[in-house]
Image (cartoon, rainbow, N blue to C red):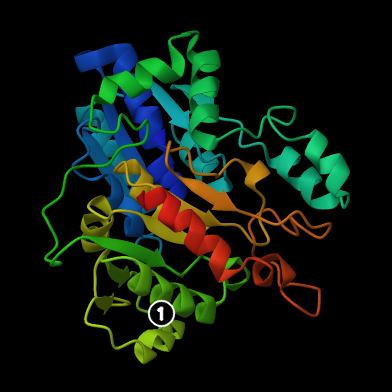
Amino acid sequence: MHILLIRFSSMGDVVLQTATVNWLRSLYGKQLKVTFVTSKEFASLVEGHPGINFVLSFDRRKEKWNDFIKRLDSHTDLHPVDLILDTHATLRSFRLKLSYWGTKQLTVDKRRWERFFLTKIKSVTVRRLFHGKIFGLESQVERIITDLQTLFGDTRGVSETRDYRRGPHQEMTSLADLPVYPIAGKYIVLAPSASFAPKRWGIQSFVELARELLKETQLHVVVLAGPDDKFCEAFDVITDPRFLNLQGKTTLKESMQILARAEASVGNDSGMNHIAEAYGVPVVTIFGPTSPLFGFVPHGKKSGYLSKDLWCKPCSTTGKSPCYRKEHICMNEISVGEVKAMALKALA
């Protein structure tokens, strides 16, 4: 059995699909071949994964679509595909499937309509009625396994997937083992970035959190962010030798090395915390304009999240839309004290 699994983006979603890979491995074992199709910038997330045989990436900045399909054709000529599993369900994945219209195909429901309706309901009381599985917005990892059980007609589910990994944390999501990044001593990671600015907790709040954690723990505090996240220069006011700002100084692979060995990670609703959880690291996730009901809440036993029940949120399905209130209340009402308390609980 050779399955072509499609998930082009984004960072967190690519990581979450490792639960799909592990579930498929629990079902088919060594007889399974998996080709993971993703975008170039996220390929390093799944390269080296023990359950993935091949990673094919599309570089939309440098490569024409037809050239990518030719590369894919050459690959499938050598390794014929039995099933295409589309976990992205976008125009791009649809175009890919059109090129293989004669191959069996399954497409996962991304719950777009449910998320759209939640953004339109402006009553906190009504939204609470939908908490859980009425809209199918349970934890994304659990939902992935539930969908796969239905698609494949196999009911072994979550426990079988967790047991398959047999790692120290038995996480359903998983990433490849990596070398140690040279940081002296134990540390906690702060990940203040996010794909869109409205999803970011205030940078001054992160600065204050870093100071509080340095004061109340013996841990180093490490900041991870991308080269474009210049707002992290706000951390320059911290001179403690246990503080390390690595914004723009690490590759994605090196960031993964750091997250894999952290004591905990605190960040926004973004991919960094999904990577940390895939390595069994407890996380604290801060939700602003997006909603935990979308299903991207942490799933680890020691992880937690913070989100305020407000009539205006979720204001969009991705957190991309600018705030239409005078103050960014969904983020500003989350205090440093609340986040610190949850971080210390995760570290306990």
Comparing 297 with 65, the one in front is 297
Q: Quadrant of residue 235?
A: bottom left
Q: Which residue is drawn at 13% across and 67% down?
A: 184
Q: Name which residue lies at 33% across and 46% down.
A: 281
Query: Looking at the rendering, in which quadrant would you find the N terminus?
Result: top left
Provide residue 163's location: percent of width, then percent of height: 30, 19
Residue 196 image offset from top left, x and y in percent: 57, 68
Residue furthest to the bottom in view is 237
The answer to whether residue 26 of the structure is visible from this angle is yes
Residue 269 placement, left or right of 321: left
- Figure check: 122 above or below 209: above
Reply above or below: 27 against 236.
above
Measured from the top left, where is residue 168 in percent x and y?
Answer: 23, 32
Q: Image check: 61 left or right of 134?
A: left
Q: Mark 1 points at which residue?
A: 228
- Left or right of 296? Residue 69 is left
Foreground residue among 219 and 73: 219
Q: Which amino acid does label 1 sit on?
A: Asp
User: Image quarter for residue 266?
Assistant: bottom left
Residue 82, can we see it?
A: no
Disc 1 crowd rating (10 Å Cα; few below 14, some 14-19, many 20+) is few
Residue 306: x %, y % from top left: 59, 54
What is the tally of numbered marks visible in this picture?
1
